[in-house]
């Protein structure tokens, strides 16, 4: 699993309204400027980066599975239409290819 996200993404997710500045995408370079919200710990930020990365991977897999299911449904529909005697062109027109 690749690392898709960094500290900026985690901070935007954990504290979207907070004010902060970060240098070099590193916790040691994080300057917290929000007095109303407690600065997230390094461990919390690392956990959020992992969560965001895992969610992105799950979303990618789900999108691939959906695309494969749609393709399989089209192929099944084309095969059924061919059994009814339609030409490939006629069948393709019906299923929107």
Image (tube, helix red, strand yellow):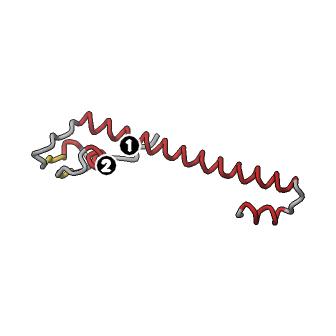
Instruction: Identify whether 86 is placed above or below 2.
Output: below
Using the image, determine if residue 50 lies above or below residue 4: above
Residue positioned 49% across, 45% down in the render = 59
Quadrant, the C terminus? bottom right
Q: Residue furthest left?
A: 35
According to the picture, the residue beneath numbered tag 1 turns out to be 52
Residue 9 vs 40, above or below: the answer is: below
Residue closest to the eye, 44 or 67? 67
Q: Earlier in the sequence, mark 2 or mark 1?
A: 2
Is residue 63 rendered to the left or right of residue 22?
Answer: right
Q: CA distance from mark 2 to mark 1?
A: 8 Å
Location of residue 25 in the rendering, given as x and y in whole percent from the top left corner: 27, 48
Q: Mark number for residue 9?
A: 2
Mark 1: few/some/many CA within 10 Å (<14, 14-19, 20+) = some
- Residue 17 picture location, percent across and down: 21, 51
Horizontally, is 29 left or right of 79 in the view?
A: left
Could you tell me residue 89's position as x and y percent? 81, 66
> Does residue 57 appear left or right of residue 39 in this picture?
right
Left or right relative to 94: residue 66? left
Indicate the quadrant where residue 91 lies. bottom right
The percent position of residue 26, horizontal first and vertical second, equals 24, 45
Label 2 residue SS: helix
Q: Nearer the viewer, residue 3 or 62?
A: 62
Contact? badges 2 and 1 (CB < 8 Å): yes
For the residue labelled by badge 1, is the local secondary structure a helix, a strand or a loop? helix
Q: Residue at x 12, y 49 (%)?
A: 33
Quadrant of the rendered structure where residue 38 is?
top left
Label annotation for residue 66: none
Name the residue located 31 percent from the left edge and 49 percent from the top edge.
9
């Amino acid at each position: 699993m690749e690392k898709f996200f960094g500290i900026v993404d985690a901070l935007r997710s954990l504290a979207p309204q907070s004010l902060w500045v970060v240098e070099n995408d590193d916790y040691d370079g994080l300057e917290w400027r929000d007095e109303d919200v407690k600065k997230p710990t390094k461990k919390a930020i690392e956990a959020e980066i992992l969560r965001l990365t895992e969610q992105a991977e799950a979303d990618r897999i789900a999108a691939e599975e959906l695309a494969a299911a749609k393709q399989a449904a089209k192929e099944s529909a084309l095969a059924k239409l061919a059994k009814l005697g339609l030409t490939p062109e006629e069948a393709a027109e019906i299923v929107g290819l």
